[in-house]
Image: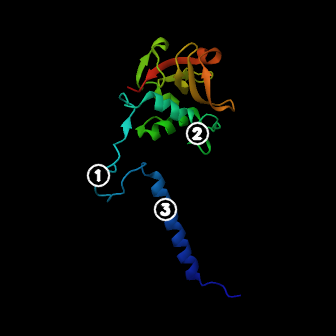
Amino acid sequence: MMKPPLTFFIVLLLFLSACTASKKTRQSAAPNAAVTDPSEPSRPMPDMPAALSIDRPLPIDRKAFIAYAKSFLGTPYKYGSADPDKGFDCSGFLYHIFQHYRVKSPRSSYNYEHAGREISPQKALPGDLILFRGENSRRIGHIGIITATEAPLSFIHAAGTGSGVIISTFSGYYKKQFVKIIRVLE
């Protein structure tokens, strides 16, 4: 049997590295971003609005926001993940939901500490975010989305107890770890 010439392997290696580089470039680009000349300023595609930021009230329908979050009920917990195919951690869950709405949001729960406007539990609305301390910590370590405000208040989140994305009530452990509720939606 004849061995392929060395040039074959060099060409194959160059081809594979070009494919890998191309894949990495596509994955790192913003969703729906236009591919442009690097010397020109980047612009969103004409039919897509510019990405929103969590630093001002977001014009997102609360019912749609919650319905989209609920579509992930049962997704497994996976620390450090924002990928529904692999699972979510609490902040990855919110990050993924905000990405769906083209919102630039924090990737870590503690970065929500100064986001939005703080509101009392009595004034909470579905779609507001609820923040908790981490176990044995004073720092924000967990986050969820309020789904219902009638007693008892409930919220959807990616629980690290092996339950994955679930809806929990604001009682017991969660009441003890509670820090605040913030409003980021209009």
Give the residue pinned by disc 1: 41
Determine whether label 1 and label 3 are within 8 Å by CB: no
| Near-viewer residue (12 or 100) | 100
Residue 98 to residue 26: above or below: above
Residue 86, image x, y percentages: 62, 44
Instruction: Say which label, 2 or 3, has the lower sequence index.
Output: 3
Give the residue pinned by disc 3: 21
| Near-viewer residue (48 or 39) | 48
Local SS, label 1: loop
Give the residue pinned by disc 2: 80
Question: Where does the C terminus fall, quadrant-wise?
Answer: top left
Question: Is residue 85 among what the camera can see?
Answer: yes
Q: CA distance from mark 1 to mark 3?
A: 22 Å
Which amino acid is tagged 3? Ala
Q: Could you tell me how many numbered marks the image carries?
A: 3
Q: Around disc 2, counting alpha carbons within 10 Å, would you say few (fewer than 14), some (14 to 19), or many (20 or more)? A: some
Determine whether label 1 and label 2 are within 8 Å by CB: no
